[in-house]
Image (cartoon, rainbow, N blue to C red):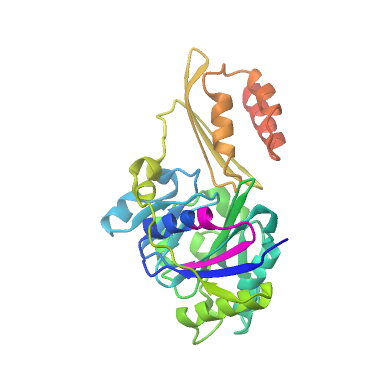
Amino acid sequence: MGISKVYYIESKSHDPYYNLALEEKLLEVCNENDLIFYLWQNDNTVVIGKNQSAFKECNINAMNKDNVKLARRLSGGGAVYHDLGNLNFTFIMHRQNYDLNRQLTVIKEALNKHGAYAYFSGRNDILIGDKKISGNAFYLTNDISYHHGTILLNSNLNNLSKYLKVSKSKLEANGVDSIRSRVENISKFVKDLDIETLKKDLKESVVEVFWLPIENLEINEVNLEKYSDPKWLYRKEVESNYEIINKFPWGEINIKFIIENNTITKVSVFSDSMDIGISDKLEKILLNKKFDYSIIDEIKELDDPNKNDLISLFTEILSD
């Protein structure tokens, strides 16, 4: 049947734990033929992907000193810095109605009303010229899904280098020498555009792209505990005596082991891959296994599009 109802909700809070909890609540209330379009802002926050290491991706000491919050989202992908010069959007719908190109068209058309000439590039970016002005991430299950992203309007981009740690391999893959040199604010390309005008343009663009009227949605209660829980924020990270780090086209992977008597007794897998299941899959395969070629046989049984890269990685490591 497709989408027959479009709802709009805007958070009045700048608290990342509230906003992420509301986002998850919207997954629960979204009916089969609904599209929910959600706009939200976090103030002074670093948000990391579901499978990332907070300590590897963030300068925790600087964040604590400057009262910058750490948050972890449900989706994969990399770490981002949010302040009130940035606007976040989320499209929520059932999986059969997910259409990334259509959703991105909403964002591009809203920006291009002002002559921005924005376009989609790579695995998760919206660019103007050669500068990234929006990063996108995705949460997809068999039934429900969301696509969310940032829109850098007038953010303090110097804080990217201050609070985020970016691996050399990731910078080299993008042909830049710093995270700051890769991104830019829309305000550098479009003059006199403010957040409130952008919100209005985005709402209008949703109506134009989906050809449906938009209705306001209200949610009264959300569960904050999950998103502010240190166990969620800092995710288990083992002290390791063996570590593997590799960069693939689909993302970086970091595997930390404790190996005792040639058996993997503890393991943590971190990744900025858009595939949110990759870390859990690999941890399950590796834990309590012998560190030998039998691992490769286990990986061959994985239901994962990137398993051939993992087979090559472990074949090379075990051959050394």
Residue reaching furthest to the bottom:
192
Percent from the top left, x then y, of residue 80?
47, 58
Percent from the top left, x then y, of residue 239?
40, 29
Whether residue 15 is visible, yes or no, is yes
Residue at 30% x, 50% y: name it.
61
Which of 127/19 is in front? Answer: 19
**For residue 206, what is the image quadrant?**
bottom right
Residue reaching furthest to the top:
261
Q: Is residue 245 above or below residue 242?
A: below
Q: Which stretch is magenta? A: 26-39
Percent from the top left, x then y, of residue 292?
61, 18
Q: What is the quadrant of the C terminus in the image?
A: top right
Q: What is the quadrant of the N terminus in the image?
A: bottom right
Residue reaching furthest to the left:
65
**For residue 53, what is the image quadrant?**
top left
In the rendered structure, the answer to whether residue 153 lies left or right of residue 211 reads: left
- Tell me if residue 36 is in the magenta stretch: yes
Percent from the top left, x then y, of residue 319?
66, 22
Which of 270/209 is in front? Answer: 209
**For residue 310, what is the image quadrant?**
top right
- Tell me if residue 184 is in the magenta stretch: no
In the rendered structure, the answer to whether residue 271 lies left or right of residue 143 reads: left
Residue at 63% x, 55% y: name it.
94
**Number of marks in the image?**
0
Residue at 55% x, 27% y: name it.
284
Whether residue 129 is visible, yes or no, is no
Residue at 71% x, 62% y: name it.
2
Which of 211/79 is in front? Answer: 211
